Image (cartoon, rainbow, N blue to C red):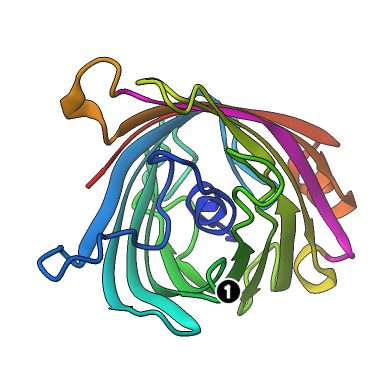
Amino acid sequence: MFLHRLPRLVALAAVTASFPAGIQPSSAAAEPDASIFSGEIGTTVANQYITRGFVVNDEGVSFQPYLDLNAELYRGEGFIDSASMILGLWSVISSTPLQGTDGGRNRFTEFDYGLGFTVTFADRWSFTPYYNRWTSPAGAYDDGHWISAAIKFDDHGLIARNFSLHPFLEVLWDPGIEAASGLCFESGIRPNITLFSESEAPINAAVLVMTGLGSGYFGETYGYFATGPKISVPLSFIAPSLDRWSVSAEYLYYDFGSMAAEYNGRDSHHLVSFSLAVGF
């Protein structure tokens, strides 16, 4: 299959907020005794499992717990600002299981694990190569893997205070799978603004605009187009001890190219998700 942990890699490639809202290159303090380790653990609840324009399971509810770990290997003041290793774990548990080798009784649809690194350079740029392997404990599809590389530009504060566009580009290579293989190019922007930034409950409002292209991966140049808003709020207003917790809600509208539309049995689709995360 062609499965991929889209929410987390888009976060890596596209989102930087003024409070914890997705795993990003390590932001550990520069003090000598600061820990080199950081990360995020959380879960997303969505009305379906969709990846790179392909709907994997649109019946029931999709629970997607994850764990991302960073280990900062370098921080300096030259052209290379920092370098970090990334370990990612991600899974899909479906309320309505796919028909697998067990006759559709196992709801553990997928488990992914991956390793990569992030290099930040020239103050605002970052580059993230990543290797991911997936398996389906339910036996709904065969195991597989892919390699990706994402580059993003952090323009926070360049246009206006607490506003950014965050352009990004991700290139993925899949070595050959049943429905889609070859190179996939995902690019876009996520304009976002932080409101009430001085309060105990700043609100980050963003709009994702992205497209998936690739004649090899999608069978044609145009794969899909996705856009929609996302609202994120930290939980520090409840208690100071929750300053690393955040909640978010997101809606995405998908328009599919001919190959994705044929596979999905529809020309467009709607994704609604809610997430709870804590950084450490």
| Disc 1 element | strand
Whether residue 280 is situated above or below residue 36 in the rendered picture: above
Q: Residue at x 45, y 24 (%)?
A: 202
User: Dividing the image into 4 quarters, which one contains the N terminus?
Assistant: bottom right
Residue 227 shown left or right of residue 84 in the figure: right
Residue 38 shown left or right of residue 254 in the figure: left
Q: Which residue is mark 1?
A: 149
Q: Residue at x 22, y 47 (%)?
A: 280
The boundaries of the magenta stretch are 219-235
Asked if residue 172 lies in the magenta stretch, the reply is: no
Camera-side residue of 179 and 207:
207
Whether residue 255 is situated above or below residue 117 in the rendered picture: above
Where does residue 236 sit, x and y in percent of width and height?
28, 24
Quadrant of the rendered structure where residue 185 is?
bottom right
Which residue is at the far top? 238
Indicate the amino acid at tag 1: Ala
Where does residue 52 sit, x and y in percent of width and height?
67, 53
Where does residue 123 sit, x and y in percent of width and height?
53, 70
Camera-side residue of 21 and 30:
30
Q: Residue at x 27, y 36 (%)?
A: 244
Which residue is at the far left? 33
Quadrant of the rendered structure where residue 264 is?
top right
Camera-side residue of 150 and 113:
150
**Mark 1: few, some, or many residues within 10 Å (few <14, many ≥20)?**
many
Residue 28 shown left or right of residue 25 in the figure: left
Q: Is residue 253 visible to the viewer in this orientation of the structure?
A: yes
Where does residue 180 sit, x and y in percent of width and height?
70, 65
Q: Residue at x 49, y 41 (%)?
A: 99
Q: Main secondary structure of the magenta part?
A: strand
Asked if residue 231 lies in the magenta stretch, the reply is: yes
Whether residue 263 is situated above or below residue 253 in the rendered picture: below
